[in-house]
Image (cartoon, coloured by chain):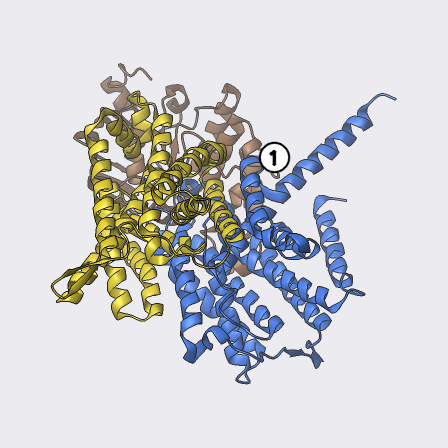
Chain colours: A yellow, B blue, C brown
Amino acid sequence: MPEVLQLLVAGLATGAVYALAAIGFTLLWQTSQTINFAQGEFVMLPAFIVLLAMNIGLPFPAAILIGVAASLLVLGFLFKQTVVDRISRHGALPLAIATIALGLVIKEGVKDVAGPAALPFPPLGGTSSLAIGAALLPVHSLIAIVVAVAAIAGLQAFLDRTPLGRSIQATAQNPAVARVLGIPVDRMTRYAFLINAALTALASILVTPVYLASFSNGEWLGLCTFVAALAGGLNLRGAIVGGLALGFIDNLAAAFLSATWRGALPLVILIAVALFRPQGLLGRSEEPAA
Amino acid sequence: MNPATLRYAAAGIGALVLIALPLGLPDYSHYVLSLWALTTIAAIGLNLTFGYVGQISLGQAAFVGIGAYVTALLTTRGWPLLAAYVLAFAACFALGSGLGYPALRARRPLLPFITLAFGTFVFLVFRNEDWLTGGIYGINRVPRPSLFGLSTAAPLGFYYFCLFNLVVVTAAVWWLRRSPWGRAFAALRANPLRAEAVGIDTRLYTLIAIALGAALGGVAGVLYAALLQYVDPTPFSLTMSVSLLLMVVMGGSGRSLGPFLGAAAAVVLPEGLRFAQNYYLLGYALAVILLMAFWPAGLMGLFDRLLTMVMKLSAASAKAPP
Amino acid sequence: MTALLSVNNLTRRFGRRAAVDAVSFEIAPGEILGVVGPGGSGKSILFDCILGRLAPSAGEVRLDGRPVTGMRARDMSRLGVARTFQRAQLFPQLTVRDNLIAAGQERRGSLWSRLVGPPDAGLADTAAEMIAFFRLDGLAVQTAGNLSEGQQKLLDIAMAFMARPRLVVLDEPATDLDETVREPLRERLRAINAQAGTTFVIIERNLDFMASLVTHLLVLAEGRVVALGDVQSVLASGMLASDDG
């Protein structure tokens, strides 16, 4: 059964990364009704910042720090201050369009700067593998699982156990009620954007070694993020379950289905969710008419 | 002159300009104008979906692609172009409803994600299913049609053929907009609660707009295959879907003239800015973000503002004491 | 004579609180029923449940003896039940005429005929009648969002009559209207009731407006029926004395 173990590890590794991005997507949705269509590009971009930093001679760990810091600044702070705050005044549709356009800006910008070719990205923990029985498990995948799970557990603990985290959660669950309770909703929303930027940066560093750094990575990563978040029911637990489940399904499909049919999975999952469980796997059912 | 007469006059002049425009210009410009006309048709379709009923579709390129492949497959086997129109329209209409129906069951906006996933899947079918689509090599030697014994093989002739299509589509959408359907679209967009209270089936009408929008994408695809005379998967990517959506927004979503302007800014303008070609799409997307921040009504909204300003100024100067 | 609308033990709970608590009543064709009660007594929620905006928690609604409980608003509209809104609900970007036609077009012809048929769905004359009838003269091509508050309210009421309904639920028709318009509005409602036999339910806090119009009264308090019957008997029972409007 070595293949099973290998699939399990690979599925968990990609699934945990989808979960990171889906949690961030969900947080933005819940706190500010922002549908971030550029989320895939948010996962694509930080890896390129890391590569850029390495290109000017910084060592890998320092480059990673630069990548995370730049993400927090640009994809967290500036995204919220300049794009979201300014445009959400005009309504949800203009904001949705703006994030779609932003995704294209990031994609085209990276293509113009770094070129269309895919670049190798150093994996955390190197390229060695761990042999367990007959199964070869890439050390990088194991590290990715540990880091992502630790990040998710840490975020959960922060949101559940600290006063600040609870305020963010209250904002996410119902911004109107949170406002009445005296929670500074705008500040909590800003924190949510920073958390999202940190999560996407982490996801970027963990996933890029597998896919290679390419300007078009955001398309598939974004789609998987949306599917994980929507199938999960747009809540934090749902995003985790959705991400992990999708990681497994995706790796199974890669092993047993043709590329075309693997590519059909997001469509099939979304339509199935819409038809049979519109509120998502872990979502509460909605009032039929209001 | 009342505003309606004025509008008919403007439409007539516009049509005459479009007929006269390519005369004396080189063949390449006929190709660009043909591309503009068919892009406008695809954008008019998306304007039904996005502009009229407020639903985001990220899969319009897939419908254009399906129209193009249907045309290539049928006409290279000797079928007439008319058959390609019928099949492309019907297939895209059916697929549009098939995606819209589940998407509209949930209260959350699922359509953008379902259409995005559909676009990804269709692209993979074009690229990987060689037995049907020729894979990355695509399908060559798509013939151009003859109409009433007139061949459209020459670039100018084909441009007029595209223009004829554009006029028919524009007239049909003009009729649709004035019809009770158009009123229902506007009503459900303006106040869905009231629309339901007066018996308007908001979900059915939204679905109709989505399906018709997809079908017009298919029609644009028919022209695309005949214009290039070959099809391959590359153009029908997410980038095309997003570009078409941005064109609708740039022109002014929900405005009849919006797609014409948006498509012109996306297809014709870069020809004049050859040096900036690599950065054009980037600039276009940035411009849309700026539009969303400052003038979400798009170019048509800006035009309206200018018009009111001019009218106010002229009124003020007419009133001013000598 | 069978009731046009009958409501049986209708209940709507929010959490543990019953905003509408086992309400039962009937309306016969041609009746004008006034629904009164203090603010928060459940008047609006009761009719939101009857008209398909809210799902009732328990109970039954019948129209012509057929159950229509929990039916969607648009299907109720197709069965000839129209409503107005406490705060005018219009299509603000459309003209007054288009608002009116939109309110009537779905009861005419088939879906297909609404595409290929005349753009006004054959309702231009009816719309013009309504415009004159509800004193909106000269405003046909005005954008509804630009009307005054009172005009918006009149348009909201006029929209309810476009589809020749059998039953119209008017939610606080006199609110937002100034004194000079109330009396003519009452006359017009009375005229429609007399000529077309249209049945009305009028939810209203303004008792003066109701006084000489309604034939029957339903008094609600805290989600329950405290009095029900023809005007004389309800007034005689003294149940309205404590009403504070």
The percent coordinates of residue C69 (x first, y second) are 25, 45
Between residue C160 and residue A195, name the one nearer to us.
A195
**Above or below: residue B198 compared with residue C46:** below
- Apparent side of residue B132 relative to residue A164 in the rendered image (left or right): right
Is residue B239 shown left or right of residue B18? Answer: left
* Quarter of the figure that contains the N terminus of chain B: top right
Q: Which chain carries label 1?
A: C
Crowd around label 1: few <14 · some 14–19 · many ≥20 (10 Å)? some
**Helix, strand, or loop for circle 1?**
loop
Compared with B7, C51 (above or below) is above
Label 1 sits on residue: C139
- Horizontally, residue C102 falls left or right of residue A58, namely right
- Location of residue B250 in the rendering, given as x and y in whole percent from the top left corner: 58, 47
Nearest the eye: B261 or B131: B131
- Dot 1 amino acid type: Leu
- Residue drawn 48% across and 28% down? C185
Q: Residue furthest right?
A: B322
Is residue C105 found left or right of C238 in the rendered image? right
Position of A290 relative to C240 (above/below): below
Identify which residue is drawn at 23% across, 41% down. Answer: A152
